[in-house]
Image (cartoon, grey):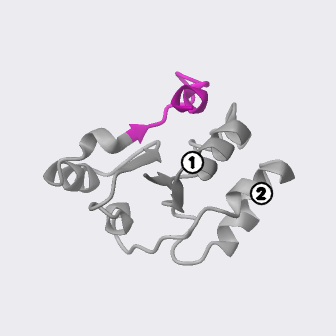
Amino acid sequence: MNIYLDIDQVLITKDLKPAKNVYEFLKYVTDNHECYWLTTHCKGEESNTLEYLKQFLDKNCFIYLNKIKPTNWDMLKTEAIDFKKEFKWFDDYVLEAEKRILLKNECFDKLVLVDLKSNPNQLKDFI
């Protein structure tokens, strides 16, 4: 399965701290799935993404972060999703246009809306 990952308020909290269980989550998804960045911090090149994450995540996470592949998209993150393959998309917020595309492709249930404020253990729940 493909896993698409946002960063802010998914892997990193609003307070710019690592999300609870982020290390275990990253280990699980990268060991078991094909993972892709789907974040404004990565549009075609992941070096900026990793540089950004160095500020917030422990260096032990980079074993797994380095396994995550970049995506490229222009206006909507859904442009980078391969709808022919099974996937989960972890994000804290999606645009209405992106929701419509997920619905059109009959895969709205593939979206995992992350809300670390109301459920700080949400990443662990996925594991």
For this orientation, the residue located farthest to the right is: 59
**Circle number at residue 62:** 2
When asked about the image quadrant of residue 85, the answer is bottom left
Name the residue rendered at 54%, 22% in the picture. 119
Give the residue furthest to the top: 118
Question: Looking at the picture, which amino acid does disc 2 mark?
Answer: Phe
Tell me if residue 73 comes above or below residue 4 in the rendering.
Answer: below
**As drawn, is 44 to the left or to the right of 75?**
right
From the image, tell me which residue sits under label 1: 32
Q: Nearer the viewer, residue 105 or 73?
A: 105
Tell me if residue 89 is in the magenta stretch. no
Earlier sequence position, callout 2 versus callout 1: 1
Task: Answer left or right for 61 relative to 39.
Answer: right
* Residue 41 drawn at (x, y percent): 58, 65
Where residue 11 sits: x, y (%)? 63, 44
| Quarter occupied by residue 17 | top right
Q: Residue 121 colored magenta?
A: yes
- The mark total stands at 2
Looking at the rendered image, the quarter that the C terminus falls into is top right
Three-letter code, disc 1: Asn
Find the residue positioned furthest to the bottom.
44
Image location (x, y in percent) of residue 101: 21, 56
- Look at the image and give the residue range highlighted in magenta: 112-127
Q: In this orientation, which residue lies closer to the viewer: 92 or 21?
A: 21
- Residue drawn at x 38%, y 51% is 87
